[in-house]
Image (spheres, helix red, strand yellow):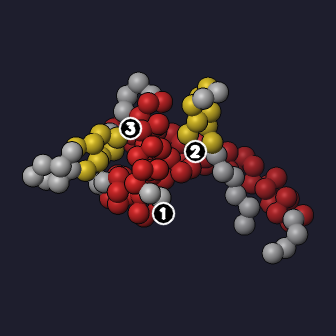
Amino acid sequence: MARLILRIELDSKVRIGEDAIRLLELVEAKGSISAAARTHGLTFRRAWTVLDEVNRMFKTPAIATQCGGIDGGGARLTDFGREIIDRYRAIESIATCLTADELSALEAAANGP
């Protein structure tokens, strides 16, 4: 099935797409960057880099981290991080609805697997 993959460019150097959004969702669900990375099939370093880039894109951080200690550290999504996910998914939903006919036409015209 054809699907639209969304990438938002806030300027020529600032982009956020499906991978970053999925990592944010996984940090929210798993409570750690390493668990999110494992689930998404990324190295910790790559996941950290992506999430650090997201934090640097905006005035307000999307995730907050805590190092070690009694609770063992971890990461959590901030309220603004949740807002990023919600806005991205809303834009994605609208774009998918608006392009459904065109995507279906392209899919029908494509060579089969």
Is residue 83 at all visible to an observer of this figure? no
Left or right: residue 95 versus residue 73 is right
Residue at x-position 41% and y-position 24%: 59
**Dot placed on the residue nearer the N-terminal end, 3 or 2:** 2
Badge 1 element: loop
Mark 2 lies on residue:
17
> What residue sits right under mark 3 in the picture?
62
Q: Nearer the viewer, mark 3 or mark 1?
A: 1
Q: Quadrant of residue 113?
A: bottom right
Spot occupied by residue 11 in the image (x, y as percentages of width and height): 61, 26
| Amino acid type, residue under disc 3 in the picture | Ala
Which residue is more in the foreground, 65 or 44? 44
Q: Using the numbered discs, state the Cα–Cα distance from disc 1 to disc 2 in whole angstroms.
A: 16 Å
Give the quarter of the image for residue 64.
top left
Q: Which mark is residue 95?
A: none
Q: Please say if the residues under marks 3 and 2 sit with CB atoms less than 8 Å apart.
A: no
- What amino acid is at disc 2? Gly
Q: Are marks 3 and 1 in contact (CB under 8 Å)?
A: no
**Residue 100, above or below 58:** below
The residue located at (17%, 54%) in the rendering is 72
Q: Secondary structure at mark 3?
A: loop
Q: Estimate how packed mark 3 is, as few (under 14), some (14 to 19) or many (20 or more) residues with alpha carbons within 10 Å.
A: many
Compared with 83, 20 (above or below) is below
Rendering coords of residue 91 (x, y %)? 59, 41
Q: In the rendered image, which residue does mark 1 sit on?
A: 41
- Disc 1 vs disc 2: Cβ atoms closer than 8 Å? no
